[in-house]
Image: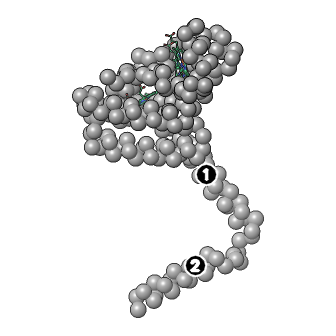
Amino acid sequence: MLEERKGGFIGRWWKRLTSPSARWSVLSLVLLGLVIGAAGVIGTQVMVARTGTNEFCGTSCHSMQWVYSEYKESIHFANPTGVQAGCHDCHIPHEYPQLLWYKARAGVRDVIGEMRGVISTKEKFEKARTELAERVWAEFKADDSANCRTCHDFTPEAIAKQSEKAQTRHANRKKDGKTCIDCHTGVAHTDPE
Ligand code: HEC
Ligand code: HEC
Ligand code: HEC
C-alpha cells in the first residue's frame, strides 16, 4: 500500500520532469543550463587552484611537514633562474580529466592517512618513506616522467649546453629506454635509504 503510494509519487515527478514545460521557453531552459554548467566549471577551477598551492599541500596536514621542510632546501624550491617547481607541478597530472581523478583519489587517501596518523611522527615517516617513494617513482615511470618534461624539454639545442656527462646520458635516453626518474631521484626531497 505504502509502496504503491511511493511509486505514484515518484511516477508523478518523473512525468513532470520528462514532459515539456508549458511555462518556460526552450531558450530560457538552455540559458539556465548554461549558467549551471558555467558555475560548475568555475567552481571546479577555484577548487583546483586553492588545493594546488604549496601552502595547501605542504602545511594543511601535519603529516606533510617532513617532505615540505626537505623541499624548501631543494633546488626546485629556490634556484638561480627564479623558476619554482611546486608540489603540484611534479605530483599532479597536468591534463584533464586525469588531474581531477588523481586529486580526488590522492585527497581521500591523504585525509584517511592523516586521520589514522600513519606518518604522524618523523620516525613513522622514515619507516614508511621507501614505500611512499616507490609509489611515486612508479607513477613517473608509467608516464615517462611527463611532469618533469613539462619544464625540462631536452631539445638537441638544450642538450648541447649541458655538461659532458649529462649530454651523453640525455642524448641516449630514449634509445636506452630510460626516463628522468631512473637517474634523478631525490630532486625535491631526501632520497630514502
Ligand atoms: C616547474 C618546473 C620544473 C619541474 C616540474 C621540474 N623541474 Fe627540475 N628544475 C627546474 C629548474 C628551474 C631548475 C634549476 C635550473 C638551474 O638552476 O639552472 C631545475 C633543476 C633540475 C636539476 C638540476 C639539479 C642540480 O642540482 O643542478 C635536475 C636534475 C632536475 N631539475 C630534474 C627534474 C626532475 C627529475 C623532475 C621531475 C621529477 C623535475 N626536475 C621537475 C624546473 C623544474
Ligand atoms: C641515463 C641517466 C639519465 C637520464 C635518463 C636522465 N638524466 Fe639528467 N643527468 C644525468 C647525468 C649523469 C647528469 C649530470 C650530473 C652531473 O653532472 O653531476 C644529468 C644532468 C641533468 C641536469 C643538469 C644539466 C646540467 O648540465 O647541469 C638536468 C636538469 C637533468 N639532468 C634533468 C633530466 C630530466 C628532466 C630527464 C628526463 C627527461 C633526465 N635528466 C634524464 C643522467 C640522466
Ligand atoms: C621537482 C619535483 C617535485 C616537487 C616540486 C615535489 N615533489 Fe614530492 N616527490 C617527488 C619525487 C620524484 C618523489 C619520489 C621520491 C624521491 O625521488 O625523492 C617524491 C616523493 C614525495 C612523497 C613520498 C615520500 C618521499 O619522500 O618519498 C611525498 C609525501 C611528497 N613527495 C610530497 C610532496 C609535497 C607535499 C611537495 C610540495 C611541498 C612536493 N612533494 C614537491 C618530486 C617532487
Q: Which residue is mark 2?
A: 14
Up/down of 19 relative to 107, above or below: below
Dot 1 or dot 2, earlier in sequence: 2
What residue is at 49 percent from the left and 43 percent from the top? 102
Q: Is residue 170 left or right of residue 116?
A: right
Image color mode? one colour
* Up/down of 46 relative to 176, above or below: below
Q: Residue 122, percent across and down? A: 26, 27
The C terminus lies in which quarter of the figure? Answer: top left
Q: Residue 21: horizontal and vertical position, in percent?
A: 69, 75
Q: Which circle, 1 or 2, is nearer the viewer? A: 2
Residue 71 in the figure: left or right of residue 123: right
Whether residue 188 is visible: no
Q: Quadrant of residue 120?
A: top left
Report the front residue among 181 and 16.
Answer: 181
Where is residue 185 drawn, in percent x and y?
A: 44, 23
Q: Crowding at label 1, few (<14), some or many (≥20) Cα neighbours within 10 Å?
A: few
The Cα atoms of the two marked residues, 1 and 2, are separated by 26 Å
Residue placed farthest to the bottom in the image?
1
Q: Amino acid at mark 1?
A: Ala
Q: Nearer the viewer, residue 91 or 179?
A: 179
Q: Is disc 2 surrounded by few (<14), some (14 to 19) or many (20+) residues within 10 Å?
A: few
Q: Which residue is mark 1?
A: 39
